[in-house]
Amino acid sequence: MKKYIISVLAVPFLMLSSCESDLTKINENPKDPANVDPSVLLTNVARQSFPVDNSANSALRMLVNTGEENDYQYLKWNNASFDAYKNILLNDVKMMEEAAKSNNKNYQAIGKFFRALHFYNLSMRVGDIPYSEALRGETDNIRLPKYDKQEDVFAGILNELKEANTLINTNDKIGGDIVYNGNIERWKKLINSYRLKILITLSKKTKVGNIDIKNEFASIVSTERLIESNSDNGQLTFFDLANSRYPTFNSSSYGSSLYMSDTFIQYFKDRKDPRIFTFAEQTTSAKEKNLALTDYNAYQGGNPISPYSDNAKLIDQKIISKVKTRFYLDPVNEPSNILSYSELNFILAEAAVRGWINQGDAKRYYETAVKANFDFYKANVKDSDKLFAGFDVNSYLNSTLVAYNTTESTDKQLERILTQKYMTMFHQSQWTGYFDALRTGYPKLPIVSGGVFPKRFRYPQDEYNTNAQNLKAAISSQYGGKDDIFQTPWWLQ
């Protein structure tokens, strides 16, 4: 366990040791993580917890690759990664251990949040995962952890988030917080809001462990503080500094072969939605014709289910939009969210439609979600005043394909909510949009005739090599021994 923490923290500790004047401290091994300030660990854990994942964008029919056959675009992916265990969760555990020495409950609460976040993401990708025995190699000498059932993992992380909410307090100060700059109230809002995100993921279930999903959701909404504005977003802000730049800055694939999907572009064109101007470049043909930046005819995409060579031909024909150049030329773009005010309100709108909370609030939550996302892009995208010139969000909310109608069927209302939610997911919330589509059937995404959307990833090859007995037992109990991407995990059953 220690070797991973050492590898991550070696440089910071060498820097810190050079400032020490006490001879005994200088002679200590600067790489020894025995006494690590939890603020250093919090910075490291947080920085790695907000990825910008273009693989999810490809699976969600937002991007097409014109240079090669992309496994995510063509739904042919294979193994998941368990790197979060060694790269993030080990340091998270260490942060909690160090915080316990000084009885700082806020670091422990935030540690529980990141545990829940990463165990959730890991389990959503594969199903059963090591949880109860994970990360205990050093403390309990458990080198080959058993796999916990997915239901037990979800029940466990919901309980951890509940504990985190209880631990949060205004007395224990924290440092190294690159998310909320030490604002504990905002952490509390994020923790409780994330509980709702997990619960809505389980919309096909009535209980998880001994938790009644509907009642737990309603209880949190009625008794706990939640994200209240974009200022509370669970997001990482980027800066033009080493290790703080936008993840796709200087990306060769973004600069060469990644283009927009017509599926994604059409959702915006049909609704006259100017957010597409923040994601996509005009086609070369449109630029040559001097079409306005806000002319929807200037934007076209490739077919995500066509061969990549067919989409490459559209480049020569000058009729395909590239991903906005800012994503790879600008070191600072909009923050990356793991849960935003907009997403929370879409979650609340869906819950209202399902009858988990007051059904009369569905329209209000939906409209709040849409407005919040427009505000997010207006505040964070350069030249947004030009891109959104003349746009009125209230008129947009009353337009045919956007207006919320409470008299429509439950299914139609869910389609309206999930479609708009999908439209907010470009470079945001990792695989949330894809999991929503698996769970609800919305938004409607194209697939080749006879094709099936994968429901999971295969387990990592490393697990076959090092923890085969426990892994094979988990595969047998879940999927009858078949570890393939089309097996249905518990949360979707």
Image (cartoon, grey):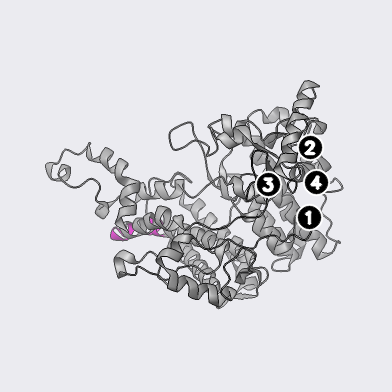
**Residue indicated by mark 1:** 416
| Residue 229 visible within the image | no
Magenta part of the chain: 99-108
Residue at image location 35% in from the left, 47% down from the top: 8
Between 476 and 129, the one lying in front of the other is 476
Check contact, mark 3 vs mark 4: CB within 8 A. Answer: no
The secondary structure that most of the magenta stretch takes on is helix
Residue under the image location 39 percent in, 59 percent down: 108
Amino acid under disc 2: Asp
Q: Tell me where residue 21 sits by quadrant.
A: top left
Which numbered marker is on residue 397?
Answer: 4
Q: Look at the numbered disc 4 and give the secondary structure of its residue.
A: helix
The percent position of residue 16, horizontal first and vertical second, equals: 26, 40
Between 370 and 447, the one lying in front of the other is 447
Q: On the rendered image, what quadrant is the N terminus found in? A: bottom left
* Labels 3, 4: front one: 3
Residue type, label 4: Leu
Q: Which residue matches tag 2? A: 392
User: As displayed, is residue 124 above or below residue 286?
Assistant: below
Alpha-carbon neighbours of circle 2 within 10 Å: few (<14), some, or many (≥20)?
few
Q: Which residue is mark 3?
A: 424
